[in-house]
Amino acid sequence: MSELTLNLPRRNPRLFLLLAVVVWAALYESLLPAARALVARLPVDPGSHLGGALEFFIYDTPKVLLLLTGIVFVMGVANSYFTPERTRALLAGRAEGLANVMAAGLGVVTPFCSCSAVPLFIGFVQAGVPLGVTFSFLIAAPMVNEVALTLLFGLFGWRVALLYVALGLGVAIVAGWVIGRLNMERHLEDWVREMPHVQAAAGEAGLTLAERIEAGFQSVRDIVGKVWPYILGGIAVGAAIHGYVPQDYMASFMGKSAWWSVPLAVLMGIPMYANAAGVIPIVQALLAKGAALGTVLAFMMSVIALSLPEMIILRKVLRLRLIGTFIGVVGTGILLVGYVFNAVL
């Protein structure tokens, strides 16, 4: 690779972005024929269980990784405008209601996950952000993030992705508002309530386009570098389901006919530890085997937004009653999402 190519993002960032889009699109279009050609060369029957599983894995792995790399890069550039300090500054001092909407919206475009829940929570409290508004952000950030949206769009199309965004944001906004109305600040741990308030700073804003491109590359290294094992694991599980699990089996307990399928899916998801990158390929395989969309999306949302590891992390700053309220309110919202999806699709 020439020195000119390596330095292109700095010398001519606009030309680099144009070339990157062209190369990305060409690679994406070549995935399906390349995967079919590769499977055809393997010593397996394409119509067998193993052949179906291999085709699923060989096609979905580069597809998901390419989609994820592209959108994480774009969101990394966008996230250079939304540092944690700037996010707190945007939310501090806002009236509830509007602030819940803003917080949920910011949660979509900011790269925060459950592992950063405690420091973000503390920072929001110190900046004077209301408790309910903080929860709107903490619910939306992991549940309606760039990874989930990318994979949903790539695997199911824009209608499902948009409906998921709308309902996911609705859960975050309403759940945060309800928690705010309950006036549960007294159920924060004492050391959190006693922290002095500090003024939220706006953060750095004067980055060049080349520096923002570098931020996009850093996001790819940080996010894709961390989640690719989950992606491979999720696609492997999805491939096994796709190739070996009988279709009628999934439809029997994750279909629309059983009213209890959505609550069961939510209860199954809470103890699990995964993220969108790992669970969405499983969702794709479950749907192909006859599971209802609302049921599997409720399962996915519970894994992402109500995972047991996140609750353990939040226990450092929240008392059990507030954690229980959080689980109850968000869980009710996820149940409604599952039933709505099953009713309209």
Image: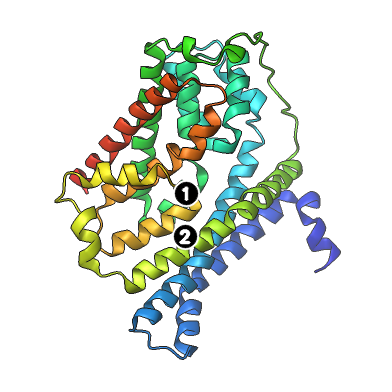
Going from N to C along the chain, the mark reached first, 2 or 1, is: 2
Residue type indicated by callout 2: Gly
- Colour mode? rainbow
In the rendered image, the vertical position of residue 333 relative to residue 180, given as above or below: below
In the rendered image, the vertical position of residue 217 relative to residue 289, given as above or below: above
Q: In the image, residue 85 lies at what x, y percent?
A: 66, 24
Tell me what residue is drawn at x 81 percent, y 51 percent. Answer: 11
Tell me what residue is drawn at x 47 percent, y 60 percent. Answer: 234
Tell me what residue is drawn at x 59 percent, y 19 percent. Answer: 124
**Residue nearest the observer in this picture, 219 or 52:** 52
Mark 2 Cα within 10 Å, few/some/many (few <14, many 20+)?
A: many
Q: Is residue 105 visible?
A: no
Q: In the image, residue 303 lies at what x, y percent?
A: 42, 44
Which residue position is annotated with label 2?
234
Q: Is residue 178 visible?
A: yes
**Residue nearest the observer in this picture, 206 or 283:** 283
Which residue position is annotated with label 1?
276
Q: Are marks 2 and 1 in contact (CB under 8 Å)?
A: no
Tell me what residue is drawn at x 75 percent, y 45 percent. Answer: 210
